[in-house]
Image (tube, coloured by chain):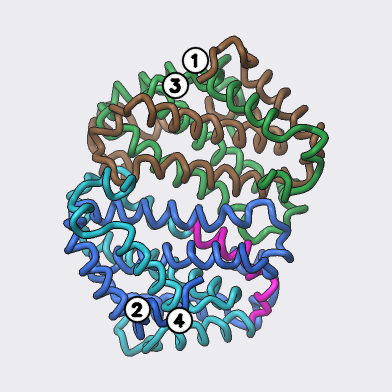
Chain colours: A cyan, B blue, C brown, D green
Amino acid sequence: MSTSNSHPRFNSLEELRGALRRLAAERDWDQLHCPKNLAIALSVEAAALLEHFQWMAEDDSARLSPELHAKVREEIADVLLYLVRLADRLDVDLLAAAGEKSDLNARKYPVDKARGSSRKYTEL
Amino acid sequence: MSTSNSHPRFNSLEELRGALRRLAAERDWDQLHCPKNLAIALSVEAAALLEHFQWMAEDDSARLSPELHAKVREEIADVLLYLVRLADRLDVDLLAAAGEKSDLNARKYPVDKARGSSRKYTEL
Amino acid sequence: MSTSNSHPRFNSLEELRGALRRLAAERDWDQLHCPKNLAIALSVEAAALLEHFQWMAEDDSARLSPELHAKVREEIADVLLYLVRLADRLDVDLLAAAGEKSDLNARKYPVDKARGSSRKYTEL
Amino acid sequence: MSTSNSHPRFNSLEELRGALRRLAAERDWDQLHCPKNLAIALSVEAAALLEHFQWMAEDDSARLSPELHAKVREEIADVLLYLVRLADRLDVDLLAAAGEKSDLNARKYPVDKARGSSRKYTEL
């Protein structure tokens, strides 16, 4: 792997968004990067990430080898890149949207009712 | 929609990660939230997002109605929530990983060769 | 659920393909049903199927309640419908393609080397 | 590509199911092939199929080059293999389930109301 100082270090999602916007603009990708295509790419990358776990026992999935961890980390990055692009094209503020949704989830699954159970988690 | 001050406003991915960590810990979800299951959930939410675009012409996908925009925004938030959880469980620094990957992409698709073409984009 | 004799009973993939072709033609869906859109729909339905298993322990996934089994069965049907439509639009003979691929898999994972291990299964 | 007579030619989904059942049994894959894992694999393969279309204009997706057509055909086969395995593990009769679902769709989207429109298609 490369050393960390050979790469740009983004300090925020806004900085990342700006860098991806320039990357796409310089390459004339704005038509390719319509929301429909970005949503496809996001889904494709999420599945590529999932592929690494498909035959793995659940317990093993928290103990990846360094090689596999590096691959998974790269797929996670791909998902974030497309998510940031898609949110940018749709004028969605990612942190604001996530704040609202996590608040909604906290209310939907009250602590005293949601403990541990997957049934409750999904059917509460 | 609710007003923004009724929800927690996260100022960074770290704050969001901390909030989601507490949400899961309080509900005993740490076993459910093994990386394998989170990768499944991420993929399922990415597909739920994609579903909104599936029969839509590409050009229309940049001009969503307010109702559809609100739904898409919520699905985008769901994807981010699971992505942040998954990265947390695997000790992946999202912005660092994204910085490395976007730098890699910039080198992989040089400006003068990548202009506009989807063929070049994918097969360069 | 409805009794089986209230529905058409297809005796082969060809009969199903013919019925879906008529269904689409009568509704002017041929433009909507371009291969790109059908591939999206297929992926979306496969994820909707996967959603039912996302928080489930692996062992439990072979023992579904009758209610959940009925839902999963319907999602499986949706995946097949889109797969048959997509194959039809691309002039792919499903059984011939599957025969070639399963034969390839049998050679790729020889019995004496592939026993049981998921590592071998994926990295042989 | 190989000639068709070098591969087994399945005459029905039942024959394909039988062959896949033997392939898995001989390799001790029955535990790996729990419904949860097969549903993951199905979703991963559907996304691998979708990947070929992700930056393609909708009209182009019906006119694939021979090389790309061969790749897409192989991904379609993979989706069918996992779908047949999953249906087998859950005792789902694919053609019966598809017959019921296509009948349901025909009633849900009556010819006179569904013509052409994607809005109607999804929101009828």
- Give the amino acid at mark 1: Glu
In the picture, the disc for residue D14 is 1
Q: Quadrant of the N terminus of chain D?
A: top right
| Type of amino acid under label 4 | Asp
User: What kind of element bears circle 2?
Assistant: loop
Residue A98: quarter of image: bottom left
Could you say which disc has been placed on residue B8 in the image? Answer: 2
Residue B103: mark in rendering: 4
Q: Residue furthest top?
A: C5
Whether labels 3 and 1 belong to a single chain: the reply is yes
- Depth order, front residue of B48/A80: B48
Above or below, comparing residue B29 to residue C102 in the picture: below
For residue B98, above or below residue C35: below
Q: Amino acid at mark 3?
A: Val
Label 2, label 4: how far apart the Cα atoms are = 32 Å
At 73% across and 66% down in the image, what residue appears? B59
Disc 3 marks which residue? Answer: D92
Image location (x, y in percent) of residue A4: 31, 85
Magenta residues span A26-44
Question: Distance of mark 3 from mark 2, alpha carbons?
Answer: 46 Å
Asked whether disc 2 touches disc 4, contact meaning CB atoms under 8 Å apart, the reply is no
Q: Residues within 10 Å of mark 4 (few under 14, many from 20)?
A: some
Give the foreground label among 3 and 1: 3
Q: Residue at x 21, y 47 (%)?
A: A117
